[in-house]
Image (spheres, helix red, strand yellow):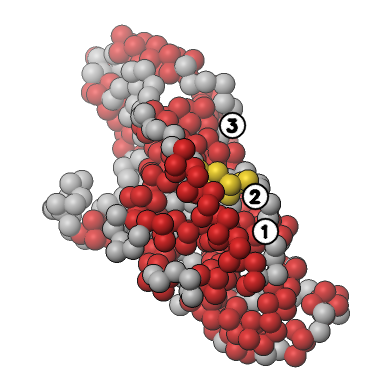
Amino acid sequence: MTDTPSGSGPLDPDRDRDPERNPDRNPDRPDDPREGMPQDPFGFAAGGIPGMPGGLGDLGALGGQAGPGGAVDMGQLGQMLTQLGQMLSQAGTSSGPVNYDLAKRLALQQLGSVSAPSTDEQAAVRDAFHLAELWLDPVTSFPAGGATVQAWSAQDWVEATLPTWQRLCDPVAQRVSGAWLEGLPAEAREMAGPMVAMLGQMGGLAFGSQLGSGLAQLSREVLTSTDIGLPLGPEGAAALLPAAIESFTSGLDRPASEVIVFLAAREAAHQRLFGHVPWLRQRLLAIVEEYARGITVDTSRIEELARDLDPADPSALESAMSSGMFEPQTTPEQQLALNRLETLLALVEGWVDLVVAEAVSDRLPGAGALRETLRRRRASGGPAEQTFATLVGLELRPRRLRAAAELWQALTERRGLDGRDAIWVHPDLMPSADDLDDPAAFAGREELDDDPMAQLENTPPRGEPDDKQD
């Protein structure tokens, strides 16, 4: 999993090594560990904000126009401040660490004109869900969640998921944008006081710009509302994206009708699980927030910047901002949060993988091939997961999906459908990362044969497990 939020880590190692795929690579520094990383990890470089008038111009050029005695060209400074005022005045009414008005406007602008799902596409989605629900009924004790079935365009996905993105991105952006100020010496903080509010607005614009671009890319690639493992859409809404599914199907040797039913079964299974396990949605999102709260920045480097920076040379600040000086450091607490998230995602995806396979394997000729394709797509981290890593700093890859599916299969054989699904009744009953190492041992625990809640009441709270990865 990546440990550098907001785009501060390379997403494609092969791209980093290949100069043809990475035009920014410096051939004179082949071993530079920072090669391939964005030049403005948190969006605070001096370039303009996409979608905003003018931008901030080139601070380096401004510094280069210094007059006698190192004085900054006041004409250019005035022009820059005027552009900044225009940008802030037209940024919308959004407040907080991320400008979501800008993010939404930019995402929809980049998508351009997108056709709404046709009447035939909407009917195909409804029919696929109806069939999938019928097939799921015998293989899980969770009934149909009563979700509203919808066919979304890419624009619909952006608008429907934005409230959840706000919850995911706010803690990360707030910690990153505030970390530099916390690390400044007291005198420097006092001097920066009048600028803090303006810098906060600029940070919100930068994050909003980055989020908008990321959402535009994600919306073209996701197939369902739960495609990246998190319940991004509104509660009670099950959705497929016909345009993305058509593109996905074009690369498969399977009929479109078969693919859409398989994806509908996955979406319906996710909705049943999130609908009947009330703690699950909250727990997944809370782990992301826990990760964000632990973000720290190397304050010694910030103190060095404050001590050595030449106020007459704005290009020096630009260089420091793009050098990775504000890159957060991963703490042990964050690593634990990442491991817990990965384990829980694997358990969710493993349960969905097993239940869908049991529901469709005898009914769809290509079920096995589609199952393997989706497994690899999730475990390897496609473009959608990579974009999510850029936005939030987490790669939602259930690396232990196969082990989790084996564990749920072992529980099914030992305890039946009702006994297997009863494990979801409380988070303290859930398997740990250690249990994924030996699924048969977990399924064979005698205490699981009793009433799970009664067993839970008689068990002392357990500590957090030492999560492992394959």
Q: Which mark is residue 388?
A: none
Instruction: Give residue 144's mark.
Output: 1
- The quadrant of the image that shows the N terminus is bottom left
Q: Which residue is mark 3?
A: 96
Q: Residues within 10 Å of mark 2 (few under 14, many from 20)?
A: some
Does any portion of residue 100 appear in the rendered image? yes
Q: Marks 1 and 3: which is nearer the front?
A: 1
Which residue is nearer to you in this view: 208 or 178?
208
Q: Amino acid at mark 3?
A: Gly
Q: Which element carries disc 3, helix, strand or loop?
A: loop
| Local SS, label 1 | loop
Name the one closer to the observer, 236 or 26. 236
The residue sitting at 37% across, 56% down in the picture is 256
Q: What residue appears at the point 67 percent right and 58 percent down from the top-left corner?
A: 144
Going by the numbered disc 2, the residue's amino acid type is: Ala
* Residue 369 location, quadrant: bottom left
Q: Are marks 1 and 2 in contact (CB under 8 Å)?
A: yes
Mark 1–mark 3 distance (CA, rounded to whole Å)? 38 Å
- Marks 1 and 2, how far apart at CA: 8 Å
Who's the residue at 44% across and 51% down the image?
223
Decide if residue 311 is in sight here. no
Badge 3 or badge 2: first in the primary sequence:
3
Single out the mark in the foreground, 3 or 2.
Answer: 2
Amino acid beneath label 1: Ala
* Percent of width and height locating residue 101: 52, 27
Q: Which residue is mark 2?
A: 147
Instruction: Please give left or right for residue 295 compared with residue 116 in the image.
Output: right
Residue 340 horizontal side relative to residue 279, left or right: left
Instruction: Judge left or right: residue 427 versus residue 135.
Output: right
